[in-house]
Amino acid sequence: MVAGHAHPQQHLFRGIGLIMAAVFLFSAMDTLAKYLLRSYPLVPLIWARYFVHLLFMLVLLGPRMRLDLVRTARPWLHLVRGLLLVGSTGLFYLSLGFLPLAEAAAISFVGPLLVTAFSGPLLHEKVTPRQWFAVGLGFIGVLVIIRPGGNVFTPMALIPIGTALCFSLYQIATRKVAGRDDPYTTLFYTALVGSAVTTLTLPFGWHAPEPWQLGLMIVIGFFGGTGHLLLIRAVTCASPMVLAPFVYSQLIWSTLLGWLVFGEFPDGGTLLGMLIVIAAGMLAINWQHMRRRTDTTDQAQLH
């Protein structure tokens, strides 16, 4: 009896550990990007992030999966997903040139709430009044962070909202392709589309990196690819709904790394806004989980 219960619990803890490691890598990637953007242009940095990711996927998965890595039932949807993620990355990196790391990350975390808002018209899912309340609460948190009309407000604070918009649509597209293709194939096309699109922009912004800049660019791409792989491994160990709250630990890492590397620590208003955004996300996750359990129970009763 004890052994039987220990096995799923071990999988749960492994999944939590993997997703915590993934979001730490994403925060570290963003920190390195912000540091590098002080001396290096945006366009080739985004290209390196996806190109290194693509090479990482080819070396790690190519020999094992071969043609299965590129087989897909919906190539056009993968193209749309890739373009949306490139847009999200580009806007977020752009914002890092004007905003503290933690503030940019917190504003962009309204993305999961936008997924809730879009799931009705785009996925034909029912959005309950409670979930709409969570969406509204999240936007109140963002307003507390950016404080429009106040002395600390800058129009650049709106850029991460564009990041959130692109990323939420990316997640919607991901849900449409989920279950049709292998998760590693989906991840590969993300890197492939990102590399192809950003390669087209290189003639307009290429700048030969110094050795240390090249090293950081490689690390950024490696962290991005590894983080996405860890996410896939995490959801094979535990339910995405169970793991979702732990994604918000990225705000903790971003705050800590921003303070250690750049001496940036959020003021009281920003911290309050971050807590409101986190609370809204937690409520949305909890209420979505409760609704799915209710729907499952109702279906079981019907049968």
Image: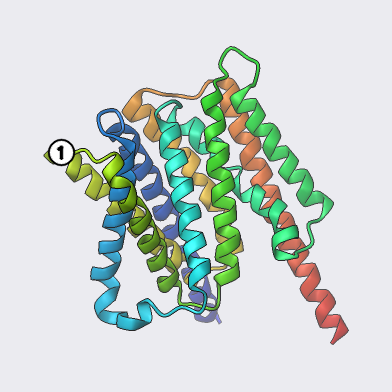
Residue 25: horizontal and vertical position, in percent?
Answer: 36, 49
Q: By what rule are the colours in the image chosen?
A: rainbow
Label 1 neighbour load within 10 Å: few <14, some 14-19, many 20+: few
Say which residue label 1 marks: 212
In the image, residue 43 sits, relative to residue 127, either above or below, namely above
Residue 191: horizontal and vertical position, in percent?
Answer: 37, 61
Q: Residue furthest left?
A: 211
Q: Residue 46 versus residue 301: which sits nearer the camera?
A: 46
Residue 49 seen by the camera: no
Q: Residue 131 versus residue 81: which sits nearer the camera?
A: 81
Name which quarter of the figure residue 154 lies in. top right
**Quadrant including the N terminus:** bottom right
Name which quarter of the figure residue 244 lies in. bottom right
In the image, residue 137 sits, relative to residue 187, either above or below, namely above
Q: Residue at x 44, y 27 (%)?
A: 100
**Quadrant including the C terminus:** bottom right
In the image, residue 48 sits, relative to residue 108, either above or below, namely below
Q: Residue at x 59, y 52 (%)?
A: 168
Q: Residue at x 29, y 39 (%)?
A: 205
Left/right placement of residue 33 relative to residue 88 reads: left
